[in-house]
Image: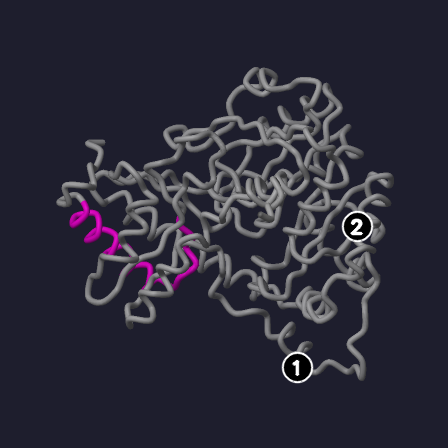
Amino acid sequence: MLKLSERAQTMPLSPIRKLAPLAAAAAREGVKVYHLNIGQPDLPTPDIGLEALKHIDRTTLEYSPSEGFLSYRTKLTKYYDKYQIRLDPDDIVITAGGSEAVLFAFLTCLNPGDEIIMPEPGYANYKSFAVAAGAVIRTIATTIEEGFALPKVEEFEKLINERTRAIMICNPNNPTGYLYTRREMNQIRDLVKKYDLFLFSDEVYREFIYTGSPYISAFHLDGIEQNVVLIDSVSKRYSECGIRIGALITKNKEVRDAVMKFCQARLSPPLLGQIVAEASLEAPPDYQAACYEEYVERRNFLIDQLNRIPGVYTPIPMGAFYTVVKLPVDDAEKFCAWCLSDFRYENSTIMMAPAAGFYITPGAGRDQVRMAYVLKLADLEKAVLVLRKALEAYAKLPQSNPSSE
């Protein structure tokens, strides 16, 4: 009998999409499903980007350079200047979304068996990319009770051994919405410097920070410029998930030259996507301001309303547009599946991402879900009501065994 590779067998299902068949079945029945499971913004793409797509003046849709168009990379340096990130166009490699950037970073910098230290919960697909690269993720636990703040440096050092090659962070964080402080970023810098590690820093949510605390990029950290590989994407800041344009950014020429081998093997990043992304850099300031204000309003509403539901708790996220929520259930994945397959309130239900899929440690996050506040306020209000009613109904089921917390 033919066997699949060990890599294929160990590749995890996405916690964000694994319940999609149940949601699709509910939708086919005419049930309204409120999708809080995936970070797909519902806000409009910039008009200037859409206009560029509609008026492409080309007779052939050709390959672009493997590193992406020079015109786009040059304009990107001006975008990063606004955040005091000083780059040359050659520091930037355009990728097919932030996902390809993470994968290429792992494939370039890590050997099979090498270890990455990552706070958990963390973005679930990092584990998938590590599996693809043959790398191993070691986790630093953060807790919902402490707002997902990083533990002391000693907890990191307990995990460092001869196979440790990198630290991976997402700042602001997906799935928790946590924003790392200056102290925490300096702590990471000192570890990277002391043990000569790579720092993979996913910073795709920098536009969405809801506190007076500053955004500290990995490129703001002195003394580790050659260690940093920054991951970026236009998916969230311009609501352009579907054009698949990201970037891998590093000042380390050896890393960049090696990344280019993978880029050449896949030929080129998306042509049409780059055209849209380059045009979107010219979006007027009020575009980003309107998006920001909308997310602030949604965050404030959702967090307040969730914490009013008996047994439910979520900290206040300081960035991105996600929050991890503790529910009064023993198994959040089972509860999420039940909501889609069995529960209806006024012919509607809710879809959430079970948070256990964002943890590496077995059993962690079993009573938690991740929610993305990417729905308009009227829909968020209905979604919270549906969740409240679902929890009330679920608590009455003998098999639910809800926790008493």
- Residue density around tag 1, few if under 14, some if 14–19, many if 20 or more, within 10 Å: few
Mark pair 1, 2: CA separation: 31 Å
Disc 1 to disc 2: CB gap under 8 Å: no
Left or right of residue 326, residue 97 in this image: right
Q: Residue at x 77, y 83 (%)?
A: 57
Numbered badge on residue 54: 1
Say which of marks 1 and 2 sits in front: 2
Q: Residue at x 57, y 52 (%)?
A: 207
Residue range corresponding to the magenta coloring: 371-394
Q: Quadrant of the C terminus?
A: top left
Q: Secondary structure at mark 2?
A: helix
Q: Is residue 197 above or below residue 302?
A: above
Q: Please state the horizontal and vertical placement of residue 367, each as a whole percent of the image.
A: 32, 37
Determine the residue located farthest toward the front in the rendered image.
1
Q: Identify which amino acid the numbered label 2 is placed on.
A: Phe
Numbered badge on residue 312: none
Q: Is residue 289 above or below residue 324?
A: below
Q: Please state the horizontal and vertical placement of residue 301, each as a whole percent of the image.
A: 33, 53
Q: Please state the horizontal and vertical placement of residue 77, each as a whole percent of the image.
A: 77, 54
Q: Residue at x 57, y 49 (%)?
A: 205
Left or right of residue 299, residue 382 in this image: left
Q: Please state the horizontal and vertical placement of residue 129, each as a whole percent of the image.
A: 62, 43
Query: For residue 193, what is the image quadrant?
Result: top right
- Residue density around tag 2, few if under 14, some if 14–19, many if 20 or more, within 10 Å: some
Q: Is residue 323 above or below residue 40?
A: above
Q: Which residue is mark 2?
A: 262
Q: Main secondary structure of the magenta part?
A: helix
